[in-house]
Amino acid sequence: MKATVFSLFTLCLMVQSIMIGQTKDMVLIEGSRYIPLYGRDSTVVEVKDFKMDIYPVTTAEYIQFVETHPKWRKSKVISLFADKSYLADWKMDLKIRDSISEKNPITYVSWFAAKAYCECQGKRLPTVDEWEYVAMADETTKDARVKPDYNQQILAWYEAPRTKENKVGQTKKNAWGVYDLHGLVWEWTLDFNSVLITGESRKDVDKDSNLFCGSAAVNATDLMNYAAFMRYAIRGSLKAKYSMKNLGFRCVQDLKEQR
């Protein structure tokens, strides 16, 4: 009987430890309704409450992932899920090049790999609407899109070379307490080019065919917001197996999964 109780106690501690690991370095994002700067018919979208990683996934964290999930290692990933650039800046399966820091954001990972990583953490990739909702904040205002200097700073980053070589957490945190949405790397989203599809609804992201190539045109609700236009243009050019030197990711978590 004592042995059984001890085993159950140990199991509870393990489960608690896992859950703590899943929610570490996350912040609560209180949802609302807003109009994305780029979208179909200027539709108001609703974002529900969720949690978001404060930082992008680091190289060190991704090393731990491939250690425990060998099928995502550089030499073993299949071509259907990642192109030839996958982990291009790694020497071998578990060793990065000397020029890379483990505190750099992980890049050269495909959408498939990023999605698998988040799911293994009990999380998921953010939707475009969720990402844009959090990213429209500056250091003091949760919707800073009307501020000229907000877009100017983002555009200045888009022109800056080699920002991916910086360590995570060196930009200023925004009003939500999130770092590096701008100023470090581009980031994968769950429905990364759904805004460009031609279906009945831009929310229809269950069809895998929507996630493999960008097409159609982007309708702008604010033609002067070139920073947002560039993000949507980049997403629309991607395919799910692409791995790019300046494209990383972070995870989010639905609140219902915290219960």
Image (cartoon, helix red, strand yellow):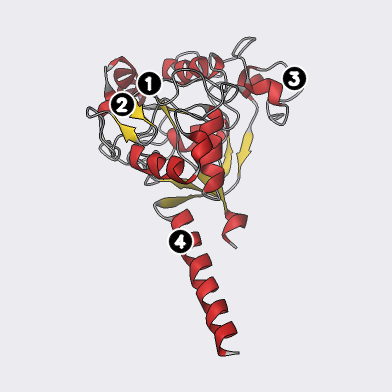
Where is mark 3, residue-wise? Answer: 199
Q: Tell me if residue 31 comes above or below residue 171 in the rendering.
A: below
Q: Are marks 4 and 1 in contact (CB under 8 Å)?
A: no
Task: Find disc 1 in the rendering and name its residue.
Answer: 245
Q: Give residue 227's position: percent from left, percent from top.
A: 42, 19
Is label 1 in a helix, a strand or a loop? loop
Of circles 4 and 3, which is in front?
Answer: 4
Of the two numbered discs 2 and 1 in the rendering, the one whose residue sits closer to the viewer: 1
Q: Earlier in the sequence, mark 2 or mark 1?
A: 2
Q: Secondary structure at mark 2?
A: helix
Q: Secondary structure at mark 3?
A: loop
- Residues at marks 2 and 1, CA–CA distance in whole angstroms: 8 Å
Indicate which disc, 1 or 3, sits on the residue closer to the N terminus: 3
Looking at the image, tell me whether mark 2 or mark 3 is earlier in sequence order. 2
Name, please, the residue furthest toward the right: 200
Q: Quadrant of the N terminus?
A: bottom right
Badge 3: residue crowd in 10 Å (few <14, some 14–19, many ≥20)? few
Q: Residue at x 54, y 47 (%)?
A: 120
Amino acid carrying label 3: it is: Gly
Mark 1 nearby-residue class (10 Å; few <14, some 14–19, many ≥20): some
> To which residue does mark 4 refer?
20
Mark 4–mark 1 distance (CA, rounded to whole Å): 31 Å
Q: Note whether residue 53 is visible.
A: yes
- In the rendered image of this protein, does residue 65 appear above or below residue 13? above
Q: Earlier in the sequence, mark 4 or mark 1?
A: 4
Q: Amino acid at mark 2?
A: Lys
Q: Residue furthest top?
A: 216
Q: Estimate the x, y position of residue 11 in percent, counting from the top left.
A: 54, 72
Cα distance, mark 2 to mark 3?
Answer: 35 Å
The disc placed on residue 164 is 2
Which of label 2 and label 3 is nearer to you?
Answer: 2
Q: Is residue 130 visible?
A: no
